[in-house]
Image: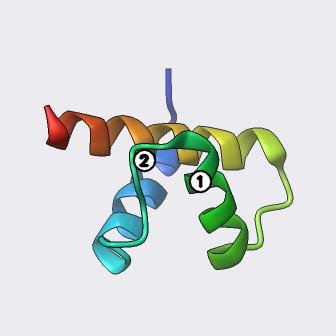
């Protein structure tokens, strides 16, 4: 279960940088490292995971 803040952050990042993210989780984590200063590793993983799932839904 994802929190509203994780979903909101992921959607905002997709709006701002639609071409930077892919359907690959590990690559999305690296991109998040460049874009954000997230102290919490689990939070970064949740955002990257939600971004990945959103993009995979668009592909299907």
Q: How many marks?
A: 2
Horizontal relation, residue 45 to residue 8: left or right: right
**Which residue is label 1 attached to?**
27
**Label 2 close to label 1 by CB (< 8 Å):** no
Query: Quick one: label 2 or label 1, which is nearer the N terminus?
Result: 1
Q: Which mark is residue 48?
A: none
Task: Tell me which corner region of the image, top left, top right, bottom left or bottom right, holds residue 10.
Answer: bottom left
Q: Secondary structure at mark 1?
A: helix
Residue at the (42%, 71%) spot, across then down: 20
Where does the image place residue 58, in percent across and percent down from the top left? 16, 43
Q: Is residue 39 left or right of residue 48?
A: right
For the point 68% across and 61% down, the residue is 30
Which residue is tagged 2?
51
| Label 2 – label 1 distance at C-alpha | 11 Å
Disc 2 vs disc 1: which is toward the camera? Answer: 1
Q: Residues within 10 Å of mark 2 (few under 14, many from 20)?
A: many
Q: Please indicate whether residue 15 sits to the left or right of residue 24 in the image.
A: left
The image shows residue 34, relative to residue 14, as above or below, that is below
Farthest residue to the top: give it.
Answer: 1
Q: Is residue 16 above or below residue 47?
A: below
In the image, 60 versus 5, the foreground residue is 60
């Amino acid at each position: 279960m994802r929190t509203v803040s994780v979903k909101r952050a992921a959607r905002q990042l997709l709006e701002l940088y639609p071409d930077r993210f892919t359907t690959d989780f590990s690559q999305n984590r690296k991109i998040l490292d460049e874009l954000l200063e997230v102290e919490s590793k689990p939070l970064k993983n949740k955002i990257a995971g939600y971004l990945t799932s959103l993009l995979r839904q668009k592909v299907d």
